[in-house]
Amino acid sequence: MNRRPSRVPRVLSIGAAIQDVFLRNSPAFRTVKIDSTHEMTELELGAKIDVNKIDFSTGGGATNAAVTFARQGLYSSFMGVVGRDIPGSTILKVLDEESVDTSRVIMDEDYNTDYSTVILAPNGERTILTYRGASAQLKSEDLAIRRNEFDWLYVSNLAGRMDFIDDVFSQARDNSVKIVWNPGKKELLEDKKMKPLLEDVEVLIVNKQEAQTIFEGGTLEELVYHALNIVPVIIITDGPNGVIAGDGKTIVRAGMYEDVSSVDRTGAGDAFGSGFLSQWAQGADLKQSLLFASANSTSVIQYVGAKTGILYQNAELHSMPMSEISMV
């Protein structure tokens, strides 16, 4: 079946817009291993710590995704709330320069723009201190999604605002807009409220541990089969082991796109999810969409900040390890 759309896909990304400041190249940011799966950065209470490098960038899962869609030639729109302040103006300027439609952005007079201080460890992992201000003020009545205005709705972390997410999904469903959901940790903790929402989702993107809390199954393949009883397309990432995805016709397993040193992992998940949709929405198959998603994520982690490494249209890609199993 031909999945290629009759028009340029139109995507609305909803979520946070954040001013990020990155602190790095400090000996004090070295990591301490707690156990086989956890590390932490210890900072002495009361100490004054020298930071040798500082970088400013804009972030927030929805703005990062919106830039991917725009760079891949889709009509991309962002909806969120920023403060009427310098960080808010900076975010809008960046999005405008990337040809992202910002006509749906609300500037709030009472709350400051979201702000994150990102402490980068030498291994590329990070600790993030986040102020959630204006972005949490987005209301259901602000959405006003209209039929034929958008083809896809991309929803990432909305800080566990389940009633708001329910309203967003209802508006999308009532106006025939397909939903891609990459839920955050707080959404995943709301198990009883989250599972009914999956009935409205077209593409669900989670990692292996998250999938195991939602679906039955011990292996990745079992998780995919159970997930496909609820959502049409499931993508389950598994860290350095790659990714598995299914669309009811085939199951694709893919390894790492490229083994590169990570400078900063901020935005890697956003780059993967939006990278997948940027190709899937244009009619690409699972393998093609996963290839670009993996390449986009790999590129992003090689730079400080979530947007610098996002790939442009017609970026040169190489192959990656993949296997495919037919389900029909």
Image (cartoon, rainbow, N blue to C red):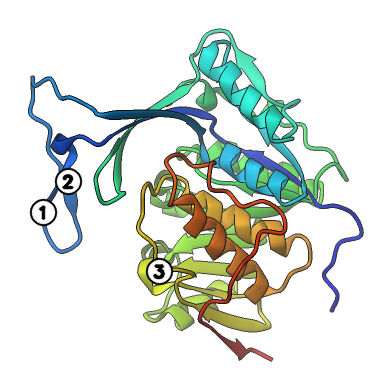
Q: Nearer the viewer, residue 55 or 185?
A: 55
Please tell me the numbered disc located at residue 71: none
CA neighbours of label 1 inside 10 A, class few (<14), some (14 to 19), many (20+): few
Does residue 204 sit above or below 159 in this rendering? below
C-beta proximity under 8 Å, tags 2 and 3: no
State the CA–CA distance, disc 1 to disc 2: 7 Å
Between discs 1 and 2, the one toward the N terminus: 1
Between discs 3 and 1, the one toward the N terminus: 1
Disc 1 marks a residue whose amino acid type is: Ile
x 45%, y 37%: residue: 159
Q: Which residue is denoted by mark 2 in the rendering?
A: 40
C-beta proximity under 8 Å, tags 3 and 1: no
Does residue 202 sit above or below 92 in this rendering? below
Q: Secondary structure at mark 1?
A: loop
Q: Which residue is denoted by mark 1 in the rendering?
A: 34
CA neighbours of label 2 inside 10 A, class few (<14), some (14 to 19), many (20+): some
